[in-house]
Image: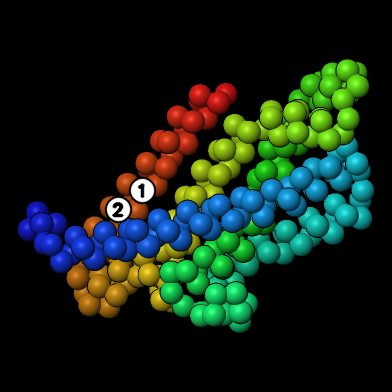
Amino acid sequence: MSGVLSSAGMQSVILTAFWQTLYMVFFSTVFSVILGFIPAIILTLTAPDGLKPNKIIYETLSFIVNVFRSFPFIILLVILIPFTRFLVHKAIGTTACIVPLTISAIPYIARVFETSLRETNPGVIEAARSFGASNFQILIHVYVKESIPRMLNGVVLLIISLIGYSAMAGTVGGGGIGDIAIRYGYQQYKAEYLIVCSLVLVAFVQAIQMLGNTLYKRMS
């Protein structure tokens, strides 16, 4: 095994694939967090116990979120090919895979953020009301501020999920660690590539989880 790992060619291939995975995961995380925060806020505000209860808006948006969450990623990847081609002018490749990765992550992180926001202590909300705080001030300074550590945990879980999805995207030309594992490890029967790719993904996930735990403790 040491001889395999010392191979300059293999190291170069794995390193390039790792940076592709990092690229896909980073940008899909950023885009999905930004876009997922919007429906999360709307769901929180219009929920039965929200600041602006609205059953129609809440139930409609909740249904849409649940529909998109129910799609297996590999199916969503195929369905979104025309939309991906429209946005980035190609349907395969590392950049192209950011589109389905982001869209698959938006409903997930929206629901996670909504849950985090709605777990805010009602007593703190009532205290803010008693001091004359507006709904906007309560939303920003109570809901969001109190939920940041919980939302951070959700982002960590999102990143870990996207790492797995990015590996799956490699099977359809997305590049990254999954692509190397399939092309070299599975199709060319090179078990060492499968082993190393698996170890890299495990190490990546562990590093993200440890970083997330550290940040959570500090922010809490």
Place of residue 75 in the rendered image (x, y in percent of width and height, measured from the top left): 57, 74
Does dot 2 land on a helix, a strand or a loop?
helix
Place of residue 213 in the rendered image (x, y in percent of width and height, measured from the top left): 47, 32
Which of 92/136 is in front? 136
Q: Residue at x 51, y 57 (%)?
A: 27
Give the spatial CA distance, label 2 vs label 1: 6 Å
Residue at numbered disc 2: 200
Q: Residue at x 69, y 48 (%)?
A: 37
Residue at numbered disc 1: 204
Look at the picture and state if 66 lies above or below 43. Answer: below
Does dot 1 land on a helix, a strand or a loop?
helix
The answer to whether the residues at label 2 and label 1 have Cβ atoms under 8 Å apart is: yes
The disc at residue 107 is none
Which image quadrant: the N terminus? bottom left
Q: Please rate how many residues cluster around mark 1, counting C-alpha atoms within 10 Å: few if below 14, some from 14 to 19, many from 20.
A: some
Which image quadrant: the C terminus? top right
Furthest toward the left, the residue is 3
Q: Residue at x 30, y 67 (%)?
A: 181
Image quadrant assignment for residue 139: top right
Q: Residue at x 78, y 55 (%)?
A: 62
Q: Is residue 5 left or right of residue 208?
A: left
Which of 33/48 is in front? 33
Look at the picture and state if 74 lies above or below 128. Answer: below
Q: Amino acid at mark 2?
A: Val
Look at the picture and state if 86 lies above or below 207. Answer: below
Image quadrant assignment for residue 147: top right
Q: Amino acid at mark 1?
A: Phe
